Amino acid sequence: MNKILGILVGLVLFSTSCGISKKTGYTKKYIKASKQVIEQTFNQQVEADWLNTRAKINLEAGTNRLGGAGWVTLKRDSALMISARKFGFEIAKIKITPDSVIYLNRIQSEYYSESLIKGAASIGLPANFNAIQELILGNLPSEIKEDAKLSLSRDTLRLVKETDRQIIFSTLNSTEFTVTEMGFVDKQTGILVQQTLSNYQTYQDSRLFALDRNLTLKTTDDSEIKISMSFQQPVWNNPSDLALTIPKSYNRAEF
């Protein structure tokens, strides 16, 4: 691991001092070492079809602040459900699929149901289920695996990948290659999604999962939503019921 980092640092220092800009043998070695760093990070990310975990969740939106316990259930590539509880009672539930968003407000007896594209935009989330899924898992998006630009500082490695739709970025710990920050900017909507990750635990033998997260969502009108989550005792590959029924007595709400 440190050998790869040493190669990267040495090549960066050499190319900087010599003013190398062409793809010489040195820059080719740098590209190869960069790919090894990215490959190592992907190799230690969680791979699971199901995630079930308790969570402490705090939300800050403008002057509003909410906190409580919750339960997060994710079925890979299919659905994400988050249930929020206060004093032992469920107060809200949201279900996100690749096609839709359904939100239940138990306190107001209201529901919100919309397509993922329209629904995600209204609450500042990316209209991309895979991106939401990777934020929960703390995994780098697959798009960053190819042709990402890598820069070095004393303690971190920075990855940036620009596509037609978004700018993806990530910061890695330079010794363990764990993700300490990840996010993206949607080039069409201007929405910024940024998440910091810490308190890594080992699961599935050698896979790493960050228990503590701080998520920031900045929308086009410069409003900001901050969500802190602390996952507790995650359980992997335990199928769960993801059915969500809207009570007939609930009124439809609009965001």
Image (cartoon, rainbow, N blue to C red):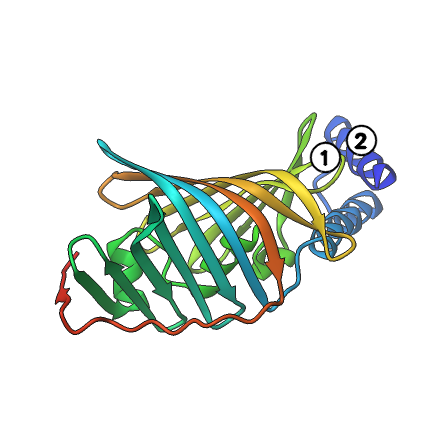
Mark 2 lies on residue: 14
User: Residue 211 versus residue 89: which sits nearer the camera?
Assistant: 89
Q: Position of residue 95 (x, y in %)?
A: 36, 65
| CA neighbours of label 2 inside 10 A, class few (<14), some (14 to 19), many (20+) | some
At x 78%, y 38%, the residue is: 8
Residue type, label 1: Ser
Quadrant including the C terminus: bottom left
Q: How many marks?
A: 2
The outermost residue toward the front is 88
- The answer to whether residue 36 is above or below residue 247 is above
Q: Position of residue 13 (x, y in %)?
A: 77, 29
Counting from the top left corner in percent of width and height, residue 161 is at 55, 51
Q: Quadrant of residue 199?
A: top right
Q: Between marks 2 and 1, how big is the CA–CA gap?
A: 19 Å
Q: Is residue 34 above or below residue 20?
A: below
Q: Looking at the rendering, which quadrant does residue 226 occupy?
A: top left
Lateral position of residue 194 relative to residue 52, left or right: left
The percent coordinates of residue 49 (x first, y second) are 60, 69
57, above or below 136, in the image: above
Name the quadrant of the N terminus: top right
Between 122 and 54, which is closer to the camera in this rendering?
54
Residue 226 visible in the shown view: no
64 vs 119: above or below: above
In the image, what residue type sits under mark 2? Phe
Tag 1 or tag 2, which sits nearer the N-term? 2
Q: Secondary structure at mark 1?
A: loop
Tag on residue 239?
A: none
For mark 1, what is the residue? 174
Residue at point 57%, 50% (across, down): 138
